[in-house]
Amino acid sequence: MVFAQVSDLHLDGSERAAERTRRVIDYVNALELDAVLVTGDLADHGRPEEYAELTVALKSPHPMMLLPGNHDRREAYREGLLGEPADGGPINVVQRVGDVNFLLADSTIPGRSNGFLAEETLAWVDSTLAADAASPAFVCFHHPPVALHSPLVDVIRLDNAARLAEVLGGHRNVVAVLCGHAHTAATSTFAGVPLLVAPGVVSTLTLPAEPRPDVDLDLPPALYLHVLDDERRLTTHCRVVVQDAPRTLTP
Ligand SMILES: [Fe+2]
Ligand SMILES: [Fe+2]
């Protein structure tokens, strides 16, 4: 199976964010994919009008799998994207694509930038993985559970990563953990499985070693293409989506 991972659209009504999202979604919509995963910070302020914008911007022939980030608001997200009554509890959804389960978990703390998996969410991850132990599963949420060596995001990563590692340690069907939030394509490991942090659509975070702004607005948006093979090995390709240059025909 092949699926795309896109993250951190931060749609806010501006043409800049809309254009970058359009560029990336147009790119993935033209591919032969099994699904598209969007790992949070869909809206920039969590306003109802931003979710109205998202319902149009995320139209796709592929199954879409969404989860909230710290810039989203649970109530408006539920009403605007899920068509559910506004409720402030964690948004945890399992979506099946082929024979693979995607656990889309809510790592947000209302009003805060850092992340935390509520006991309710950890119990849901545990029971959902156990309920279908024969099927491969991806555990997806917004906040990376490890330090990425960026001073900006390391202080707002997932606070209770050790508890999640405990839960994941009890299961053998987790293929990988997929996150967003950091606006940089980064790979690491967590709880004995690969950890993939998706690049951001709206901006790119740089390392102190790079002579660029901490949050670079000029680097183009990027996305991941994940391939899961029959041996349950995950291979990930990164695509940078540059704007098409106007073509001039030479006479
Ligand atoms: Fe973000
Ligand atoms: Fe975030």
Image (cartoon, rainbow, N blue to C red):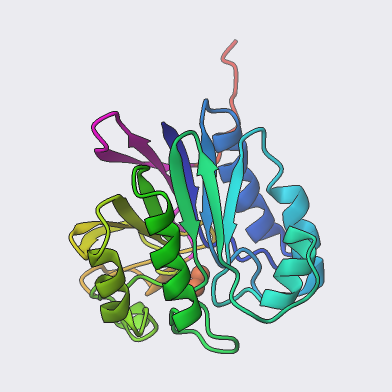
Name the quarter where the C terminus is drawn. top right
Q: Residue at x 44, y 84 (%)?
A: 114
Residue 34: image location, x then y, percent = 51, 33
* Number of numbered discs overlaid on the protein picture: 0
Q: Is residue 197 visible?
A: no
Membership of 220 in magenta stretch = yes
Asked whether 213 or 27 is in front, the reply is 27
**Observer-nearest residue: 214 or 42?**
42
- Tell me the quarter of the image containing the N terminus: top left
Give the residue displayed 61% in from the left and 66% down from the top.
10
Q: Is residue 90 magenta?
A: no
Corner quadrant of residue 94? bottom right
Seen from the viewer's position, the closer of residues 97 and 71 is 97
106 vs 213, nearest the viewer? 106
| Magenta segment | 217-241
The residue depicted at 67 percent of the width and 75 percent of the height is 74
> Residue at (44%, 79%) from the top-left corner?
117
Residue farthest to the front, as pictured: 131
